[in-house]
Amino acid sequence: MTDKTVAASSLVSAAAGTGSETSYARATHAARGTGRVDAATGAVVPPIHVSTTFERAADLSYPRGRVYSRADSAAYDEPEAVLTTLEGGAESMLFASGMAAAATLFQALPQGARIVAPEVMYWGLRKWLIDVARPAGIGVAFVDMTDMAALAGALDGGADLVWIETPSNPLWGVTDIAEAARLAHRAGAVLAVDNTVATPILTRPIEHGADIVMHSATKYLNGHSDVLAGTLTVSAGAAGDPLWQRTRMLRGMNGAVLGPFEAWLLLRGMRTLAIRVDRASANAAAIARHFSGDPRVRAILYPGLPDFPGHDIAARQMTGGFGGMLSLCVAGGRDAAIDMAGRLRLFARATSLGGVESLIEHRASIEGPTSPVPDDLLRVSVGIEDVGDLIADLDRALGR
């Protein structure tokens, strides 16, 4: 076993705990990072490893297990270990972005593979599947992932990978992860889950049968709108699968990797993940309740509302809240929605989600004419500001 393997194993053990420590809550694991104190200095904050290359031994071997940072960066050990523990997986990989993480996984599929994905999902990845995957010979079928009968029908044609996103961006539809896993595995497919919105604080897809979990770590994992990053975490059962091993190889070969400072910032961001998710979820729930039934709003899309389709499934697989994302469909249509967004003062009109600041965005105008998003919809990323101030800002912007 190399020094690198020993070090990584020790980090995971430190993060996961042993004995009675295995009962620690996810919030504790997130706040402590790996809990490792630097042996050389006693520092409780880990150092940043910036070296791109590593020394050989006299016999030209690499006894420490590291060759070159594109595949072997020491900067990745701790954030990958923390994420592995939070997701309850076997191992994780960092990538340069969420798109890089997902695209690398798709590229690792065998030639002529078939993917089943949601009709409504993160727009950038949906566009990649249409504009890049299909021309490259990968079959892609889009289905309503809130309808398990529709998924079962799509799998009758065979599949190599089922991709789900729950709650799905930006309609926040809820997919039953356990049932999707059952159907995918029956068809001989791998189930991958985009867990960006729920985060491992609220949902651990591997516990429900998922094989691989993806995050746009730019969002909640980092949480401060200052790092572009992505992650994949694999279950123990799928860690030895050729798909995972090929994904790891392609990460290095394609150079889809994160810089050391960004990896360090991601680790720092994860240490406040639990309290940020708790606060954002509570704020979003309060906003959803406040505007539910308001005649100025055609619909509130939020899994935490009891009458939201899929609420019961969300309550079963989301623990501690329903996330900080919601959408407002403004009465009066597209022009009314855009006008309302323009009058806001606290909410920044900006792309992205999961930061400490509240953001709002008119998705249909960004996604274009092929978007499945209603043109009266405003996507809201609820931050951690005072919820009374947020509600007052939305109330004023909606007018009377």
Image (cartoon, rainbow, N blue to C red):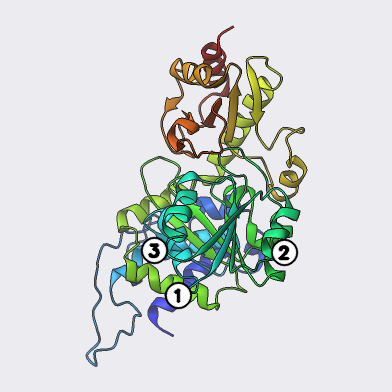
Q: CA distance from mark 3 to mark 2?
A: 34 Å
* Local SS, label 3: helix
Mark identifier at residue 306: none
Q: Which residue is mark 1?
A: 246
Q: Determine crowd level at label 3: few under 14, some 14-19, many 20+ residues with C-alpha closer than 10 A.
A: many
Q: Would residue 36 be visible to someone looking at this image? A: no
Q: Earlier in the sequence, mark 3 or mark 1?
A: 3
* Local SS, label 2: helix
Q: Determine crowd level at label 2: few under 14, some 14-19, many 20+ residues with C-alpha closer than 10 A.
A: many
Q: Which residue is mark 2?
A: 183
Q: What's the amino acid at mark 2?
A: Leu
Q: Position of residue 318 (x, y in %)?
A: 68, 47
Mark whose residue sits in front, 2 or 1: 2
Q: CA distance from mark 2 to mark 1?
A: 24 Å
Query: Going 46% across and 37% down the picture, which residue do you hit?
Result: 367
Which corner quadrant holds the C terminus? top right
Q: What's the amino acid at mark 3?
A: Tyr
Residue in front for this viewpoint, 189 or 375: 375
Mark identifier at residue 76: 3
